Image (cartoon, grey):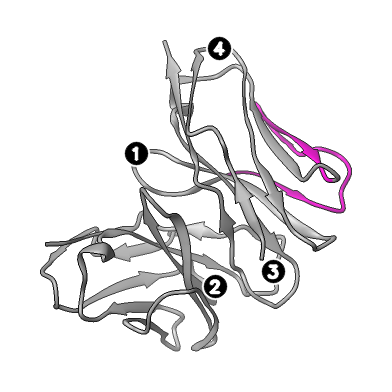
Amino acid sequence: AQTVTQSQPEMSVQEAETVTLSCTYDTSESDYYLFWYKQPPSRQMILVIRQEAYKQQNATENRFSVNFQKAAKSFSLKISDSQLGDAAMYFCAYRMITGANSKLTFGKGITLSVRP
Amino acid sequence: KAGVTQTPRYLIKTRGQQVTLSCSPISGHRSVSWYQQTPGQGLQFLFEYFSETQRNKGNFPGRFSGRQFSNSRSEMNVSTLELGDSALYLCASSPNPFSYNSPLHFGNGTRLTVT
């Protein structure tokens, strides 16, 4: 079974600085998708960034980028120029590309606070 | 385009009662998934529906059930409520189970409190 581990329950960053959130996963599949979702106090899960495992290039979305290390099964999220609105829970998630289902396996999440 | 709509936003029930939660997916999305979120267990997959059929089911007791209607709207039902069922229930939609590149779109959830 696939598992996703986020070992840091909380992190804090100064506004305008850079922070990296860690995620590791375990799977025997060779192709899959990885996601980072953000959950602000409004409770709605919002997609931050996604990465397909067969793509070597790390995904980037504006201030958000990932460091995808397939062999190490590591998928960290870097937030540059942190803003107060980035404060939220962040979840790393895995999706397999077989079985014709949309199931995501989530990590426990990390609470990010941003200091003004 | 309207997002995923979940109703109600909050529910308070008593142990032993049953509850029904509703989810309307994004227009054109035909796959609906349900997740339970608790502080202790995090986000856990409940089940997924596509074309009115349950495609996949998580490791939850039979008290948790769901269904999907022909317009893709979905409901989940929890019978004989227990205190441990208190959680945020999130619904997510996607075009279909084969659209692996499409992310799930989540609703704001229903906060269920069992007393």
- Residue located beneath label 1 in the image: A41
For mark 2, give the secondary structure. loop
Amino acid at dot 3: Ser
Q: In the rendering, at what x and y percent does residue B46 appear? A: 45, 71
- Residue located beneath label 3 in the image: B99
Amino acid at dot 2: Gly
Marks 3/1 same chain: no
Which of label 2 and label 1 is nearer to you?
1
Work out which quarter of the rendered image holds the C terminus of chain B and state it: bottom left
The segment highlighted magenta reads: A48-70
Q: CA distance from mark 3 to mark 2?
A: 13 Å
For mark 3, give the secondary structure. loop
Please tell me whether residue A69 belongs to the stretch shown in magenta: yes
Instruction: Please tell me which of labels 3 and 2 falls first in the chain.
Output: 2
Q: Is residue B65 above or below residue A82?
A: below
Instruction: Mark 2: give few (<14), some (14-19) or many (20+) Cα within 10 Å.
Output: few
Q: CA distance from mark 4 to mark 1?
A: 21 Å
- Residue located beneath label 4 in the image: A16
Chain of residue at mark 4: A
Q: CA distance from mark 4 to mark 3?
A: 36 Å
Q: CA distance from mark 3 to mark 1?
A: 29 Å
Marks 4/2 same chain: no
Instruction: Please tell me which of labels 4 and 1 falls first in the chain.
Output: 4
Residue displayed at 36% across by 63% down: B5
Q: Is residue A20 above or below residue A31?
A: above
Q: In the rendering, at what x and y percent does residue A63 appear? A: 65, 26
Q: In the rendering, at what x and y percent does residue A87 appear? A: 44, 28
Whether tag 4 and tag 2 are in contact, CB under 8 A, the answer is no
- Residue located beneath label 2 in the image: B28
Chain of residue at mark 1: A
Residue displayed at 38% across by 50% down: B40
